[in-house]
Amino acid sequence: MKWLLILFFTSLLTTQAQQSSTQSISLICDEFYGVDDFENLYYSTNNVLYKKSPTDRMEFYDLQLGDIASVDIINPLKILVFYRDMQTIVFLDNRLNEQLRLNLNTLQPQRFIEHARLAGERRLWLYNMDMSRLELYDYVNNRLINSTTPTSNPVVKMQCDYNFCHLITSNSIISFNTYASETSRISAEVQLPVAYDFELLVYKNSNGWKWYRFDKEFRFSESELKQPISKEYVPESLYIKGNKLYIYNRNRLIVDTINLKK
């Protein structure tokens, strides 16, 4: 009986610890983009970008530019907002004030840019749909730095940091460095959304949650959660920050503490 009581209370404490590791926040939006180091939330509704803190909410919009295709908050002091239809990138400061506007229609040679992300100071990752290739572009000097060979499948999303860009297709994730060299390739069923934060990459497909770690050889290797995330979550948006996974689903932002095996 004594051992049964010990096992019961141990199980109870474990369950309580798991429950306390998950938060749920009410958030009504069209798209959730992520969280910065100060836990400000970034999201959009009706093509208005919002930055929300516990005490304030800022916004940016230019309805003449149409739909927001993507927002990159890797550098919260230089936020990238990409309007694909108008081939325009707007850079914002940490108060969502406009810093700079780039018209990609003026690029020479002219091409249609499907995806755009930050690649460090003065540089961008651009996916050239006309040539089916990834380009590293210096927007200050209007100079193409590097470009990859053409990809065989349509790229549905990009996840990037300053040194690597990961092209996501329906059946693969292909990683490139700033020299336009392929460093890694995951060949598997991939479903959006996909989240990436320098070291970790995660998405959910028909087989459940898939976790990968970017190793010292600049390759993704599959990893496992010690505490699997509930299967009931069907993510509309995903974001990783530190040891937390942010899952946006049905007007709720689920914040789950993650603990990956080394």
Image (cartoon, grey):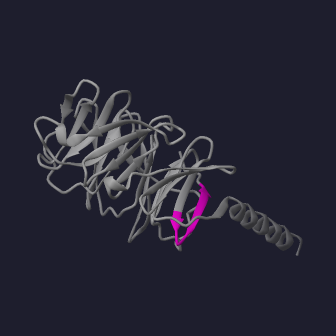
Where is residue 27, by image quadrant?
bottom right
Looking at the picture, tell me which residue is in the foreground, 110 or 178: 110
Q: Which residue is painted at 63% across and 42% down in the image? A: 38
- For residue 254: magenta? yes
Q: Is residue 49 above or below residue 19?
A: above
Q: Quick check: 113 left or right of 98? A: left
Looking at the picture, tell me which residue is in the foreground, 220 or 141: 141
Q: Which residue is painted at 28% across and 45% down in the image? A: 88
Q: What secondary structure is the stretch in magenta mostly built from? A: strand
| Furthest residue toward front | 64
Q: Which residue is painted at 55% across and 55% down in the image? A: 245
Q: Quick check: 130 left or right of 229? A: left
Where is residue 85, by image quadrant?
bottom left
- For residue 220: magenta? no
Q: Which residues are magenta?
A: 248-257
Q: Looking at the picture, how far across and down is residue 123, in whole percent?
A: 31, 31
Q: Looking at the picture, how far across and down is residue 10, in whole percent?
A: 79, 65
Which quarter of the rendered picture does the N terminus lie within? bottom right
Q: Quick check: 4 left or right of 230? A: right
Q: Which residue is painted at 41% across and 34% down in the image? A: 216
Q: Quick check: 187 left or right of 221? A: left
Q: Looking at the picture, how far across and down is residue 48, in whole percent?
A: 45, 56
